[in-house]
Amino acid sequence: MALSPRQLALRMAELAVDKKAEDVVLMDLREVTNFTDYFVICTARSDPQMRAIADSIQEGLLPQKQKAWHAEGYDGRSWILLDYVHVVVHVFLPETRQYYALERLWGDAPVERFEEAGGAR
């Protein structure tokens, strides 16, 4: 059974939390843009953790036959982007996340935050 874009985004957030990503948010962009439905944004404390989070998301979605349409940033060492068309994942180092401030840029979008316990708050 195929995942809806929301189910896909929620699963991505769970996978990020499982790898100890910090400040995990799901932004619902359906009413504010037409290029994607959701952003999943999270912070990693190091380059290895950033890669582990991105790898975990990609590997964790393979059983659902979900594969990133595009991935970039593995060589940039400050931001990895995984584009699944309806959901785009941003894994940032803290200073890069602060600089680009996507939550502020897309401030009209509803936001759900996730904690280590694995659920929205």
Image: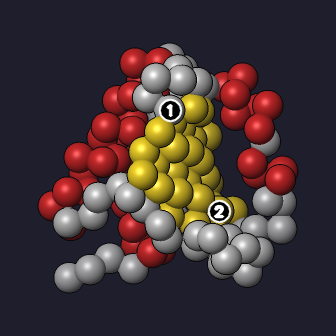
Q: Residue at x 77, y 75 (%)?
A: 32
Q: Position of residue 29 (x, y in %)?
A: 68, 71
- Residue 75 to residue 83: above or below: above
Mark number displayed over residue 5:
none
Q: Is residue 10 left or right of residue 114?
A: left
- Report whether residue 10 is seen: no
The quadrant in which the C terminus is found is: bottom right
Q: Position of residue 37 (x, y in %)?
A: 58, 73
Q: Quadrant of residue 31?
A: bottom right
The colour scheme is: secondary structure
- Report whether residue 91 is seen: yes
Q: Quadrant of residue 36?
A: bottom right
Which residue lies under the disc numbered 1? 73
How far is disc 1 from disc 2 in space, using C-alphas?
21 Å
Mark 1 or mark 2: name the one nearer the start of the chain: 2
Which residue lies under the disc numbered 2? 27
- 10 Å crowding of disc 2: few (<14), some (14-19), many (20+): many
| Mark in front: 1 vs 2 | 1
Q: Amino acid at mark 1?
A: Gly
Q: Residue furthest left?
A: 63
Q: Residue at x 52, y 20 (%)?
A: 77
Q: Amino acid at mark 2?
A: Met
- Residue 117 to residue 88: above or below: above
Mark 2 secondary-structure assignment: strand
Mark 1 secondary-structure assignment: loop
Give whichever of 14, 65 is nearer the camera: 65
Q: Is residue 5 left or right of residue 26?
A: left
Q: Residue at x 70, y 34 (%)?
A: 97
